[in-house]
Image (tube, rainbow, N blue to C red):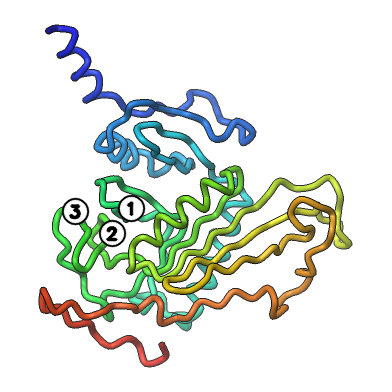
Amino acid sequence: MFHKVSKKIQKKFRHPKLPKEPLEENRLPFKIGSNISIKNYNKFLESQESSGYKFEYNDGEVFIEDMSTPDHEYVVALLQDYFKIPNENVIIDPPIDVMGSPSHPSPNANGLVIEPDIAVYPSETYVPTPNSGPTYLGPPPSDTGGNPHARIICEIAVSQKILSLERKCTLWMMQQYVRCVLGIKLYDSRTTRNAHGKFNRSMEAKLWRQGMPTLRWDFGTLQKGNDNPTGCNAPDIPAYLITIPINYVFWDPPIPAIGYVPLAAPSNC
């Protein structure tokens, strides 16, 4: 009897544990917990906002999948700037909100909380704060802070494996309010250099869109798996442009069952 009670107590208070020493990228993915409940994982995630790690929860096991590196943070900052361009330099109450790592309920509705690298939201001026209840699943859904659910998601992988990246991107697409997901994988730098003296690198981007085929770009200086150049060697090359319509951000269908009527999107969208 005591043994059973002891096991229940251990399970209740079992949480992932971060490594005591700085973690090197070549050790990723790195397991930090087993037999972790979703509830305990969510609590752990809330307390690790400044840890600099990206986590993955898989059937009770918790892994560090990636970490904040200069390359990762540069790509995140660059994409955030691009998504803010339609705001036309409006800083206070812009029509489009761009945030990093806001918590959302997992689209598989199992109670798990997940975080993207970048979330692009509609402003509450155009999409009212949803009354989605304690689960945040809606209708209409919200993030765990009660904001309108992100419509565009970006995931950036440096050390994270490509299969793990794709798994998370396709998970996001299970939520219909996520209109598209952009996943970018940066592979290790090569030992050779390009004409500008920079180390060659293979990079891959995929764009998942609701109801449409997935698009893919091999856009580093060298193709993945060989030493052939990609052709992506200057700005604004049509074959390497990724176009995401602004109106994706304001996708907000009516919900007759609850009397939800969407507001009008900005005139330039």
Q: Please identify the quadrant where the C terminus is shown.
A: bottom left
Marker disc for residue 192? none
- Residue bearing mark 3: 135
Say what secondary structure mark 2 lies in.
Answer: loop
Dot 3: few (<14), some (14–19), or many (≥20) neighbours within 10 Å?
few
- Of labels 2 and 3, earlier in sequence is 3
Which of the 4 image quarters holds residue 140? bottom left
Q: Residues within 10 Å of mark 2 (few under 14, many from 20)?
A: many
Q: How far, Cα to Cα, is label 1 from label 3?
A: 12 Å
> Where does the image place residue 213, in percent across and percent down from the top left?
52, 71
Q: Residue, x 70% and y 64% (percent of image)?
A: 219
Q: Nearer the viewer, mark 2 or mark 3?
A: 3
> Which residue is at 55% across, 47% downward?
163
Of labels 1 and 3, earlier in sequence is 1
Amino acid type, label 1: Ser
Determine whether label 1 and label 2 are within 8 Å by CB. yes
Look at 39% across and 38% down and name the residue there.
Answer: 58
Residue 160 figure quarter = top right
Disc 3 marks a residue whose amino acid type is: Thr
Which SS class for mark 1?
A: loop
Which residue is painted at 86% across and 49% down in the image? 192
Q: Which of marks 1 and 3 is in front?
A: 3
x, y percent for residue 86: 47, 81
Residue neighbourhood size for the residue with mark 1, other residues' Cα within 10 Å, grouped as few (<14), some (14–19), many (≥20):
many
Inter-mark Cα distance, 1 to 2:
6 Å
266 versus 141 height, above or below: below
Q: In this view, does 192 lie to the left or right of 189?
A: right
Q: Which of 163 and 112 is in front in this view?
A: 163
Q: Which residue carries the number 2 mark?
A: 143
Determine whether, in the image, residue 253 is placed left or right of residue 164.
Answer: left
- Residue ID for mark 1: 103
Instruction: Say which element carries label 3.
Output: loop
